[in-house]
Image (cartoon, grey):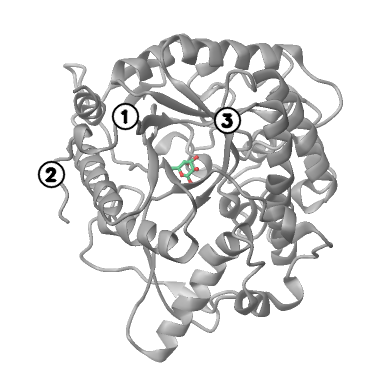
């Protein structure tokens, strides 16, 4: 069963989707141009202390203006797919109502640019940049935001649905809801568990209802949702730590996977949340379980937990393992974790197909005087994770594509520009893009 190392493209199916992944707020910039409305991340960035380097997304990678060059770069890598996200506040600056034609025109050009370069567009509808106008009414905590999201989905899929045939409703509800409304570290920076769980319920509900809208506007479209998932281990074999592992898995993984696969919210996790559990109306769980075409999986690192009475609803605490390899972010590097995760999701939920919609690493990259970036660690990370992907597929997991995070260094949320995840280095002073050694390797891998 062992996979070829370093992996070879020829060992993957010939119709496999190879891509790179980006998101609107992290790269576009042009924050106040062509009628774009304010997003919750614009507002969050103005609040002191929220972003580690005090930066914002107003310019970012200036992709709004440099997209032809960025798509050229993606094409030059040899990928055949490109994952991007649409900025809702560019389309409906107030969240609903008035449509901004310039926003639609931008994504028209971008999608046409992908198609002209042989890049299959994979569009994410929501990668966290909620229009601030909706946040004024509670954002995702407000059930009305579901209706607003469906309005937005209808507008954008009517416009692009003839050319975009791969749609991702949401990116990582854990991050947009739990980190945004409970942990307070992402926009909108709130810290209320009941609010976060209600927001999360509405996000899942909006996903479920959007599927029919997308299918109606985009004939033959494939639709899915992307989750951030982690394989979770117990710190010891003690009964206490093992029970904490089950609880943590409930909060972190099953809370999303179960309802999407028609099982409702997991009973043990609902009990942990108690009175903070979300209000659910008749029909909601059926809507959330609407069948999709694929499950998007973002894999970065495994987690290990121990029992901890004060560790939130799951009464668990993440352990800091000694002696493991880590990225500059401190995230454990575990290619085996990808195999463990994919085989687990396949065994327990058996989605028809999975797509690795994100996987990548951040290191302290240095642009050398000779104009190169020697990121041996990222290259090795990529090679080992692709080998793991191949192992998982050999074990029978149906995976349809792999998107490396990310094409470019970009605005890494609360870390600002301090974390570089790109296959290409961005010199923010000049906005030049320099392919790193990892990007060079990916392109060699992709070329037969
Ligand atoms: C994921 C996000 C993506 C990026 C990577 C590093 O959680 O989806 O936008 O920030 O992490």
Q: Residue furthest left?
A: 5
Give residue 25's mark: 3
Residue placed under numbered mark 1 in the picture: 423
In this rendered view, identify the residue nearer to me: 108 or 65.
108
Question: Circle 3 sits in a helix, a strand or a loop, which is it?
Answer: helix
Which of labels 1 and 2 is toward the front? 2
Give residue 86's mark: none
Question: Circle 2 sits in a helix, a strand or a loop, which is it?
Answer: loop
Q: Residue at x 62, y 13 (%)?
A: 108
CA gap between label 2 and label 3 equals: 36 Å
Question: Circle 1 sits in a helix, a strand or a loop, which is it?
Answer: loop
In this rendered view, identify the residue nearer to me: 154 or 238.
154
Q: Position of residue 399 (x, y in %)?
A: 38, 45
Res. 428 visible in picture: yes
Which of labels 2 and 3 is toward the front? 2
Which quarter of the rendering shows the N terminus?
Answer: bottom left
Examine the image and state in which quarter residue 221 appears: top right
Dot 3 beta carbon under 8 Å from ligand 1: no
Dot 1 beta carbon under 8 Å from ligand 1: no
Q: Residue at x 64, y 53 (%)?
A: 177
In this rendered view, identify the residue nearer to me: 222 or 40.
222
Give residue 5's mark: 2
CA gap between label 1 and label 2 equals: 20 Å
Give the mark nearer the N terminus: 2 vs 3. Answer: 2
């Amino acid at each position: 069963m062992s996979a070829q190392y370093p992996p070879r493209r020829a060992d993957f199916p010939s119709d496999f989707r190879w891509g790179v992944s980006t998101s609107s707020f992290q790269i576009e910039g042009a924050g106040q141009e062509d009628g774009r409305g304010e997003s919750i991340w614009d507002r969050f960035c103005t609040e002191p202390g929220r972003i580690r380097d005090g930066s914002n997304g107003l310019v970012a990678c200036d992709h709004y203006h440099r997209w032809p060059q960025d798509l050229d770069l993606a094409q030059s890598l040899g990928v055949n797919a490109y994952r991007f996200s649409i900025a809702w506040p560019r389309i409906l600056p107030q969240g609903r109502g008035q449509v901004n034609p310039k926003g639609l025109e931008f994504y028209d050009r971008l999608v046409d640019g992908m198609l002209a370069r042989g890049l299959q567009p994979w569009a994410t509808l929501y990668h966290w940049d909620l229009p601030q106008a909706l946040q004024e009414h509670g954002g995702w905590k407000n059930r009305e935001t579901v209706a607003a999201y469906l309005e937005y989905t209808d507008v954008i899929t009517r416009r692009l649905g003839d050319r975009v045939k791969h749609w991702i409703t949401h990116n990582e509800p854990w991050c947009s809801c739990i980190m945004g409304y409970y942990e307070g570290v992402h926009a909108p920076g709130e810290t209320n568990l009941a609010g976060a769980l209600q927001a999360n319920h509405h996000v899942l509900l909006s996903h479920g209802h959007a599927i029919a809208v997308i299918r109606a506007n985009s004939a033959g479209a494939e639709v899915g949702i992307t989750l951030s998932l982690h394989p979770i281990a117990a710190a010891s074999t003690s009964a206490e730590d093992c029970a904490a592992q089950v609880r943590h898995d409930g909060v972190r993984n099953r809370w999303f996977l179960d309802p999407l696969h028609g099982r409702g919210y997991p009973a043990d996790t609902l009990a942990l949340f108690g009175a903070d559990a979300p209000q659910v109306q008749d029909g909601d769980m059926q809507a959330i379980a609407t069948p999709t075409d694929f499950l998007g999986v973002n894999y970065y690192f495994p987690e290990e937990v121990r029992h901890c009475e004060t560790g939130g609803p799951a009464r668990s605490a993440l352990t800091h393992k000694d002696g493991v390899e880590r990225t500059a972010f401190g995230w454990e590097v575990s290619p085996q974790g990808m195999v463990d995760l994919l085989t687990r999701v396949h065994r327990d939920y058996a989605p028809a197909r999975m797509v690795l919609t994100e996987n990548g690493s951040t290191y302290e990259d240095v642009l050398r005087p000779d104009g190169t970036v020697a990121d041996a660690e990222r290259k090795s990370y990529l090679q080992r994770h692709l080998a793991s992907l191949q192992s998982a597929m050999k074990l029978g997991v149906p995976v349809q594509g792999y998107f490396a995070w990310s094409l470019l260094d970009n605005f890494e949320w609360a870390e600002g520009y301090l974390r570089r995840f790109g296959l290409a280095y961005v010199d923010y002073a000049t906005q030049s893009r320099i392919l790193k050694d990892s990007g060079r390797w990916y392109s060699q891998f992709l070329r037969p």
